[in-house]
Image (tube, rainbow, N blue to C red):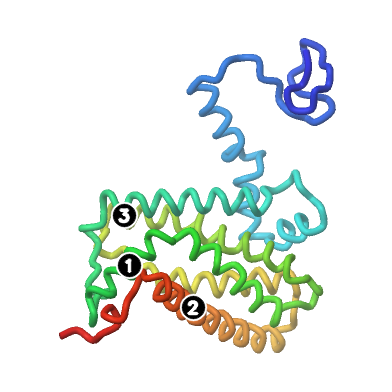
Amino acid sequence: MECKNCDLPLRSDYSFCSNCGAKIIRNRLTLKNLWYDVTERYFNLDNTFLKTFWHLFTKPQLVIEGYINGVRKKYLNPISYVAIALTLSGITMFLIKKIFYDKIDWQGMIQGNAAFALKWQEVTFDYASLFFLMYIPILAIAGFLTFNKIKYNLSEHFVVFIYVLAQYSILSFPVSITILLIGPENYLKIGTPFLIFILIYSIYVLQKLNNYKIKGLLGRSLLYTLLSITGFFGFIIIIMIVFFITGVFNLEDFAPPK
């Protein structure tokens, strides 16, 4: 018998490969062992998902510094972690579009030019994952310019904010689902608190990594917030220009309501 992952010859009684550590699979795939594999991989208390999620709150420097310094087994890597976050975000968007859309109070978003607001809302749904990923460089650049006592390069700051934004998305999933189930008309009201959470949580993570004194922390936090907000609105302006050039929006969309 050979390992299906690294082709090492194995004894028939082995449960794991002695070379690559992969589990030896002997049975055909069934729903039962598929479910077991998913729960064992992501929700076992001794495994990486829950440990990564919890330590990104309690010890974020261990997760992030560990990955940057070469630790790969103890915590979930940032790409896998953000993939889970995007999957959960996609589930939320699907439920909103297919089940809860008519139950959400959109009036606050469509004041003024209702036609434009509704078109922008549709575009936001369609490109939600892309927008989410584009926030990573915005915050990474802001963090790189303000919190860099440990001299991380820009790519390493990308890792920091992949973890930060994935953590936000994963945390927001159960909150969003709960609100959609018990009071979907209030769904839009969670937007502002979660934006504030991203700023506070990202400052918390950056401080854990850099360990500034209180005076330096306050000034850097203010500058980081200003750069992040500026970058966010700059991104929105660029997106509007791109959509205008590509024909998604036109001049009539920007005209004041009659």
Give the Cα separation between the discs numbered 2 and 3. 27 Å
Viewer-proximal residue, 245 or 70? 245
Determine the image quadrant of residue 18. top right
In the picture as drawn, the residue positioned furthest to the front comes out as 246
- Residue ID at (62%, 87%): 223
Q: Residues within 10 Å of mark 1 (few under 14, many from 20)?
A: some
Give the Cα separation between the discs numbered 2 and 1. 17 Å
Q: Which residue is mark 2?
A: 238
Viewer-proximal residue, 255 or 35? 255
Residue 121 is marked as: 1
Give the Cα separation between the discs numbered 3 and 1. 12 Å
Quick check: 184 left or right of 232? Answer: left
Q: Position of residue 138 (x, y in %)?
A: 59, 74
Identity, as a three-letter code, of the amino acid under mark 3: Ile
Identity, as a three-letter code, of the amino acid under mark 1: Gln
Q: Which residue is mark 3?
A: 96
Q: Are marks 2 and 1 in contact (CB under 8 Å)?
A: no
Q: Nearer the viewer, mark 2 or mark 3?
A: 2
Vertical comparison of 26 with 140: above or below: above
Q: Position of residue 192 (x, y in %)?
A: 41, 73
- Residue ID at (70%, 89%): 215
Going from the N terminus, do you reach mark 3 or mark 1 first? 3
